[in-house]
Image (spheres, rainbow, N blue to C red):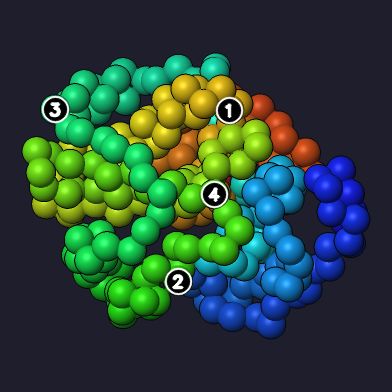
Amino acid sequence: MTTSEHGNRRDLKFFISTPSPCGYLKDRDSISLFADPKFPFTPAVYDLLIDHGFRRSADYVYRPHCPSCHLCVPVRVPVEEFKPSRSQKRVWKRNQDLRVTTHKLGLKQEHFDLYKKYQQSRHSEGEMARHDINRYFEFLDSEWSETLLMEIRDGNRLIGVAITDVVRRGLSAFYTFFDPEEEQRSLGTFAILWQIKFAKRLQLPWLYLGYWISETRKMNYKTRFLPLELRIDDGWQRITRDELIAMQTKTGA
């Protein structure tokens, strides 16, 4: 891939990872295609890669590349056309007492404490539950990305954090965590709704939501933000609610 249109004339090289256990589907291995970590990335280059279905973890940029499985599908929301459902409108209204502020990504003990509480409640057996504060921040941070952190507070109490990357043509929702005791607020949904509104305010056309896996129930929330586009066969395709339901029914998710 040549990136000269973004002001860099070097060719970006790609590598394939060794197989490792899939974090989403049991009894399967995953393989990733990842961009040369020594490449001098910029938000503009990352924007180009996101448009080709890549994501970031720390400074590493990757996308699934499993030869026998193609279930990880990049998805994005066209923010100007997004229409909240009735349940999403209720979530938005329910949380109008909260205060959301935007900051540059930084390391705070308060954020890490909430992250640990969330991981212990939702993913206690996962690797992320064992992160110390340095490993936590290493996962979120990047030397080259423009990354923002949204604090969600009930009064002065921090109850949610959403991390998002700003690229040339959108926001890329990176990671969200929240107080599991506030489950009735649907803070994960609220954080996505807030990022859609924030992208509109910045006049950015897309909110990228990462990968959707039709066979994984915990990924189904992404299909509730309509209209939705999926990256299929090397291009973005608009998909209807009925088509999404048919895909989920076929896989039993």
Q: Nearer the viewer, mark 3 or mark 2?
A: 2
**Residue behind mark 2:** 138
- Tell me if 164 is positioned left or right of 8 in this view: left
Indicate the amino acid at tag 3: Asp
- The quadrant in which the N terminus is found is bottom right
Question: Answer yes or no: do the residues labelled 4 and 3 have beta carbons within 8 Å?
Answer: no
Mark 2 element type: helix
How many other residues sit within 10 Å of disc 2, few (<14), some (14-19) or many (≥20)? some
Mark 4 element type: strand
Which dot marks residue 97? 3
- Tell me if 64 is positioned left or right of 135 in this view: right
Task: Identify the residue at image location x=54%, y=63%.
Answer: 142
Q: Nearer the viewer, mark 4 or mark 2?
A: 4
How many other residues sit within 10 Å of disc 4, few (<14), some (14-19) or many (≥20)? some
Mark 3 element type: loop
In the image, is residue 203 above or below residue 27? above
Which dot marks residue 242? none
Q: Earlier in the sequence, mark 4 or mark 3?
A: 3
Separation of marks 4 and 2 at Cα, in angstroms: 15 Å
Q: Earlier in the sequence, mark 3 or mark 2?
A: 3
Q: At which x and y percent is residue 7?
A: 83, 48
Separation of marks 1 and 4 at Cα, in angstroms: 14 Å
**Residue behind mark 1:** 204
In the image, is residue 44 above or below residue 31? above
